[in-house]
């Protein structure tokens, strides 16, 4: 675990949050720095874990393993072959990854759930359960939006179920509903 004094800042920035498991669970409150950095090829397995969290986010809903999800093409294509040349992602870590937000382009013949057009990548994100509610998701999304602007992208889309906590997060950065597919909202952010 990286504690305050051990951390190295990146241009993606760092900020401390309360450690959910301080001193191995002794109960003492301590804070750790969460460092944001670009996602790299070695993050593929972590992205897949977070994809499982995003696809099966309901506490009282069904749960699936990474292997199950990797066998479902409509989910697996969010991370398959990571990273493709046009993929972009951000990882939050405290010595190990605790969250990620990434984007990927899709085609009309193999669309994501939030597909709008071939020039608009779709955002996916997830934070490890015990690290949620500490602002990490909000920071990941901000960093991804900034990186997307720097990459000269003009819009981002996503698909979210109306009662997912993530919806508020998306609305706060400016995503707006542009459609509805099944029970899910398609949201768009102009950059
Ligand atoms: C959505 C997600 C990435 C947000 O990450 P996070 O680090 O918890 O985000 P933040 O701490 O920045 O909080 C985001 C908002 O969600 C709320 N929230 C997050 N988890 C919550 C929970 N379990 N219960 C109630 N509110 C919750 C926070 O209170 C905050 O809202 P507020 O600022 O209005 O108070 C995370 O909850 C997650 O991984 N969920 C499962 C995967 C998923 O659903 N991905 C999105 C699919 S579209």
Image: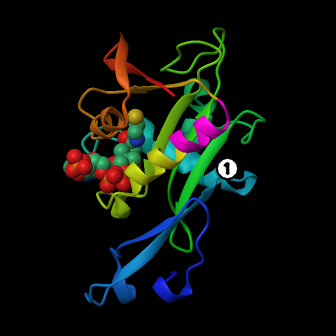
Q: Does the magenta stretch include residue 146?
A: yes
Query: x, y percentage for residue 121?
Result: 59, 26
**In the image, is residue 14 above or below residue 123?**
below
Q: Specify the principal SS of the magenta part.
A: helix
Q: Residue furthest right?
A: 85
**Residue drawn at x 73%, y 42% as measured from the top left:** 83
The vertical placement of 39 against 86, above or below, is below
- Identify which residue is drawn at 34% across, 64% down: 130
Residue in the picture at 66% in, 9% down: 109
Q: Give residue 186's quadrant in the image.
A: top left
Under circle 1, the secondary element is helix
Q: What stretch is highlighted in magenta?
A: 145-152
Query: In the image, residue 6 lies at what x, y percent?
Result: 55, 86
The residue where tag 1 is placed is 44
Is residue 119 on the magenta stretch? no
Q: Is residue 63 visible?
A: no
Task: Answer left or right for 149 relative to 128.
Answer: right
Residue 43 versus residue 184 in the image, above or below: below
The residue located at (72%, 41%) in the rendering is 82
Residue placed most toward the observer, 183 or 190: 190
Q: In this view, does 79 lie to the left or right of 163?
A: right
Asked if 46 appears above or below 119 in the picture, the reply is below
Let me know if residue 24 appears in the view.
yes
Residue 118 point in image, percent of width and height: 65, 15
Classed neighbour count for the residue bearing mark 1: other residues with Cα under 10 Å, few (<14), some (14–19), many (≥20): some
Left or right of 83: which side holds 120?
A: left
Nearest to the observer: residue 82 or residue 71: 82
Residue 85, horizontal then vertical, whole percent: 78, 35
How many numbered tags mark residues here?
A: 1
The quadrant holding residue 149 is top right
């Amino acid at each position: 675990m990286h504690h305050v004094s051990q951390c190295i800042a990146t241009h993606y920035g760092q900020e401390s949050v309360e450690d959910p498991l301080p001193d191995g669970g002794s109960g003492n409150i301590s804070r750790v720095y969460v460092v944001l950095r670009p996602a790299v090829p070695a993050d593929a397995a972590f992205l897949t874990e977070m994809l499982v969290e995003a696809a099966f986010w309901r506490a009282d809903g069904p749960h699936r393993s990474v292997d199950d999800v990797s066998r479902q093409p409509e989910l697996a294509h969010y991370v398959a072959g990571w990273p493709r040349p046009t993929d972009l992602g951000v990882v939050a870590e405290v010595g190990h990854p605790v969250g990620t937000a990434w984007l990927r382009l899709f085609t009309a013949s193999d669309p994501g759930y939030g597909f709008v057009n071939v020039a608009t990548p779709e955002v996916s994100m997830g934070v490890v359960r015990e690290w949620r509610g500490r602002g990490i998701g909000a920071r990941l999304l901000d960093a991804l939006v900034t990186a997307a602007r720097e990459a000269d992208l003009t819009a981002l889309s996503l698909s979210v179920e109306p009662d997912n906590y993530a919806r508020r997060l998306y609305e706060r950065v400016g995503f707006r509903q542009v459609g509805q597919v099944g029970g899910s909202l398609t949201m768009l952010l102009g950059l």
